[in-house]
Image (spheres, rainbow, N blue to C red):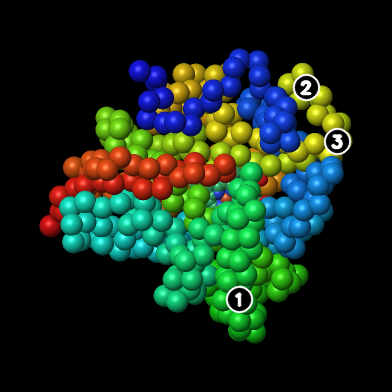
Amino acid sequence: MRAAAWSDTGSDTPPGAWVVRDETLGAFVVSGYDEAARVLREPGWSSDPRRIAGRSLAVPPGVLLFLDPPDHTRLRRLLSPAFTPRAVGRLRPRVAAIVDTVLSGLFADADEADLMAEAAYLVPLAVIAELLDVGAEGARVFREHTPGLVRMLEAVPTAEDVERGAEASQEVMMFLLPLLVERRRAPGGDFVGALAATDGLSLEELLATCVLLLAAGHETTANLIGNGASALLRDRAQIERLHADPARAVEELLRAEPPVRLAGRVALTDHELGGVRVPAGSRVVVRIDAANRDPRRFADPGRLDLSREPLPHLAFGGGHHYCLGAALARLEAAETLTRLFGRFPDLAPAAPEPRRRTSTTFNGWATLPVRARRSS
Ligand code: HEM
């Protein structure tokens, strides 16, 4: 049995092939930890897909993820105060209440459930809907359109991905626009009010940011919860370690089962990376999943060990695009997983077999059937 039997995302990179040219992708694929960290952290690499030589791509304006310095620096500085660990810490009671409400509904009518649809997707959806103060109608709109929205983030998008992504983004923007216009007139003191009142943030940037928060924060966090629950169901001995130190446990789950597999970059100048020449204008795909299992960096990388001494994994990226929502995602995952296994100690996999999500970018479960006896 492979050590990583609980996963199908382990790196299959042969030793030495940490940077390779993939003609099908039209990109250099970076699988080594040090090489990936260099691309993410050092200057000379762009996040703007329009810089890929010989390609003409449309990129929506004002989206942090696709901006380079100095535009990125300016926008990121405006948005950062809302996402510091301290600001997010203040959300803990609300996140805990949301998790409790979701878990109260789980197994309410039956002793079997799909953990993805009935818990993992619901927690981040409710959190983001509350942060953006969009009410029940907003939560419905978000729920309907997130699956389309995240198709925009596929590393190898099909024509249908592009079309569905654009449609979903349009729907979400049409819903949010009047709410945000009103918030800029009368902000209020909550999360979205603080964003709307940020000096120097244009309406276009505010709108793009809210759509990005939904696209970047929903699917990813749902996958962290689902991947974490699945890993623990297959390795129950580690549930104790989750309860002993939830924060550390979540780091190892992020390392071993990163919800985002890839990050895209473009070489701005000629680079030498892992002994390979990467010319300016080349597309580069950073394999976060492979880097997180680089044996040169992580001992016995295929083994899930929730008490592993934390090392800097790349699940949230690195450098100036490091995930803005990292503290929030960690909080949601720790609250959900500890409360899930605390409330349902006999939680177990159920039939049929879980189904993996098909995506080049996201690593997660489409369905995760589970059963438990409801606690009284
Ligand atoms: C950026 C992963 C949750 C908002 C990123 C990046 C990664 C990532 C890898 C960097 C992409 C790159 O460098 O190209 C994750 C994972 C999450 C998660 C694994 C959950 C487990 C969230 C949440 C939010 C969020 C909850 C907000 C509500 C963002 C934003 C960026 C970002 C705004 C862009 C930052 C920038 O470009 O400066 N995320 N994310 N993410 N994430 Fe997350």
Q: CA distance from mark 1 to mark 3?
A: 38 Å
Q: Nearer the viewer, residue 188 or 269?
A: 269
Q: CA distance from mark 2 to mark 3?
A: 13 Å
Q: Position of residue 288 (x, y in %)?
A: 59, 35
Mark 3 residue type: Ala
Which mark is drawn over residue 250? none
Which mark is drawn over residue 174? 1
Residue located beneath label 3 in the image: 280
Quarter of the image where the N terminus is located: top left
Q: Nearer the viewer, residue 57 or 237?
A: 57
Seen in the picture, residue 340 relative to 237 is either above or below; the reply is below
Q: Position of residue 131 (x, y in %)?
A: 50, 67
Which mark is drawn over residue 276? 2
Helix, strand or loop at mark 2: strand
Q: Is residue 65 left or right of residue 235?
A: right
Seen in the picture, residue 233 relative to 75 is either above or below; the reply is above
The single residue placed furthest to the top in the displayed view is 15
